[in-house]
Amino acid sequence: MDEGKWQSASFCKSLMACFTTCMILGCSCLFFAFPCAFLAVNVSIAFPIVAGILFILCFTTFLITSFMDPGILHRGKAMHDNLDPKIVKVNGILFHLKWCRACQFYRPPRCSHCRVCNVCIEDFDHHCKWVNNCVGRRNYRFFFLFVLFLTLYKLTLLGSCITYLVLNHHKSMSVEKSVTYPFCLNLGNTRGYSCNWPISTKEESFMN
Ligand SMILES: [Zn+2]
Ligand SMILES: [Zn+2]
């Protein structure tokens, strides 16, 4: 890929991560400013405390997953391609190692080349476009925690919004209510990051 195409592809990839950041921050601002503020004053201070802790955990693990090295193997310096597969024995098991033309080395077992990032990744799971990074050996646990905290955060927001609407069902339409209704519709959608949880669905893996 030439330099110009690579730069425009990198820009597009960054847009997806920016979208995720804006969604998390934007939805959180609206939630804390409207339904959560009402619940904190009229029901319990536990609503903003629990939601605030989950927001911090969710956003922190998102940033770590996005910016952490997922397990990149540095390129070799071979002058020629070695197209013959190499066979190695590890703990009595035979592995056929394939030559990676882009990285110029034999890929170790459980290592795959990500075509989006154009690098080989140790224990490659998949490339997540929403965090704009590969999920591999080093950041897998943070990706797992991110999805877990995000799910808990979404459930907390959904429960809070439903509580708010039940308590205010007799009141006429207000700004708070008009913000909370779309929240319930959006948060009730169980897809989202769970659909980006392929663990072993290699069709999403951009592998060579
Ligand atoms: Zn490679
Ligand atoms: Zn990647």
Image (cartoon, rainbow, N blue to C red):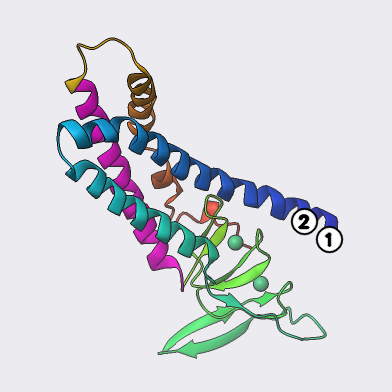
**Disc 2 packing (10 Å; few <14; some 14–19; many ≥20):** few
Q: Position of residue 183 (x, y in %)?
A: 36, 29
Q: Is residue 39 visible?
A: yes
Q: Position of residue 116 (x, y in %)?
A: 65, 58
Q: Are marks 1 and 2 in contact (CB under 8 Å)?
A: yes
The kind of residue on which mark 2 rests is: Gln
Q: Is mark 1 within 8 Å of ligand 2?
A: no
Task: Say which of 92 and 135 sits in front.
Answer: 135
Query: Which residue is at a point 32% across and 53% down the rendered structure image?
Result: 149
Q: Is residue 157 left or right of residue 167?
A: right
Residue found at the far front of this picture: 41
Please tell me in which quarter of the rendered image ligand 1 is found: bottom right
Task: Say which of 4 and 78 sits in front.
Answer: 4
Q: Is 85 a magenta residue?
A: no
Query: Which residue is at a point 37% across and 60% down the rendered structure image?
Result: 144
Q: Is 144 a magenta residue?
A: yes
The kind of residue on which mark 1 rests is: Glu
Residue found at the far left of this picture: 43
State how far apart marks 1 and 2 are (Cα): 6 Å
Residue at image mark 1: 3
Q: Main secondary structure of the magenta part?
A: helix
Which residues are the magenta region?
138-166
Task: Say which of 111 and 151 sits in front.
Answer: 151
Residue at image mark 2: 7
**Disc 1 packing (10 Å; few <14; some 14–19; many ≥20):** few
Q: Which mark is residue 174?
A: none
Q: Position of residue 58 (x, y in %)?
A: 37, 54
